[in-house]
Amino acid sequence: MFELTGKTAVVTGGARGIGKAISTTLAKQGASVAVADLNPREAADTVSVIKSAGGNAMAVETDVTDLESVKAAVKKVTEELGAIDILVNNAGWDRIMPFIKTTPDFWDKVIAINYRGVLNTVYAVAEGMMAKNSGKIINISSDAALVGSMGEAVYAGAKGAIVSFSKSMAREFARNKINVNVVCPGPTETPLIDDMKAADDFAVKVLGNIDKAIPLKRLGRPEDIAAAVIFLASDAADYITGQVLSVSGGLSMSS
Ligand SMILES: NC(=O)c1ccc[n+]([C@@H]2O[C@H](COP(=O)([O-])OP(=O)(O)OC[C@H]3O[C@@H](n4cnc5c(N)ncnc54)[C@H](O)[C@@H]3O)[C@@H](O)[C@H]2O)c1
């Protein structure tokens, strides 16, 4: 099930956290994986993990906020691994603080990484997928997009934009047999959560007892999110497009 041998996948932000789990799981299922990340050292480490497990992967330094950087990465991946079948837009970033404490520079950064980055990558892979008349695009949003999130107003807005954009692209790309779906993690144990807690006491307060509010009584693990992505990347999901799947231990039950 979920066999991906012969497929080429790109995972943005694939070096660590959820992206690392997605990259390693895609490779385990047989895909050749491009770990496209701002951080070349951590991307190389993830590639080593995949290769030592017998998988095929490459690191490609990419800044998703910069269309030229994304185009160059797509060209390199296509040359080295073949035409791209699967795009996972996972790169993201945030800091938790009350909206009135944020600044316009912060808004620009959050929107550039979390939303503009998705526009850039979809734009860059679209032609290749349309030429093949097939493709799977999985965009990582957040439960914050569905139900809001205290201290993450700008991020929640950017993640909400991903949902609307993905549904629109699912309609546009349907004629090209390109499926576009969204996975919304709830709070998940990754370095991002650690960074947010270290940056602000407000984040510690917001995230402190969050596991108690989760029906399944624990935070997500990166592997939980990867499992949903693998399904949506596979032929088993050929008839699913424009959908939003929350992977949050039941924290959010609306979409
Ligand atoms: N961890 C959570 O609780 C949680 C919850 C909901 C949604 N998400 C989303 O899941 C995704 C992964 O989050 P994570 O917790 O694993 O984060 P993380 O910070 O642990 O990893 C993010 C990766 O993205 C890379 N990245 C950042 N900016 C980039 C850029 N401009 N170009 C390319 N790569 C860039 C980083 O180098 C890093 O490797 C994000 O989209 C995040 O918003 C996370």
Image (cartoon, rainbow, N blue to C red):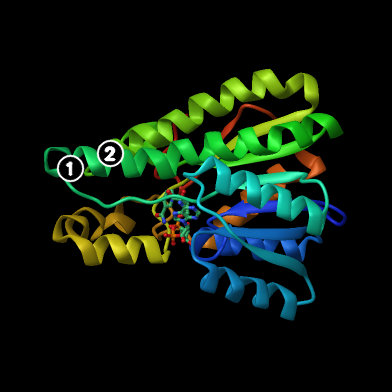
Badge 2 or badge 1: first in the primary sequence = 1
- Going by the picture, which residue comes out furthest to the left? 100
Callout 2 amino acid: Trp
Q: Secondary structure at mark 2?
A: helix
Q: Is mark 1 within 8 Å of ligand 1?
A: no
Q: Secondary structure at mark 1?
A: loop
- What residue is at 40 percent from the left and 60 percent from the top? 218
- What residue is at 38 percent from the left and 51 percent from the top? 93
Residue 72 image offset from top left, x and y in percent: 64, 49
- What residue is at 24 percent from the left and 42 percent from the top? 105
State left or right for residue 202 relative to residue 17: left
Please tell me how crowded label 1 is: few (under 14), some (14-19), or many (20+) other residues with Cα within 10 Å: some
Disc 2 to disc 1: CB gap under 8 Å: yes
Residue 107: image tag: 2
In the image, residue 83 sits, relative to residue 147, either above or below, namely below
In the image, residue 172 sits, relative to residue 118, either above or below, namely above
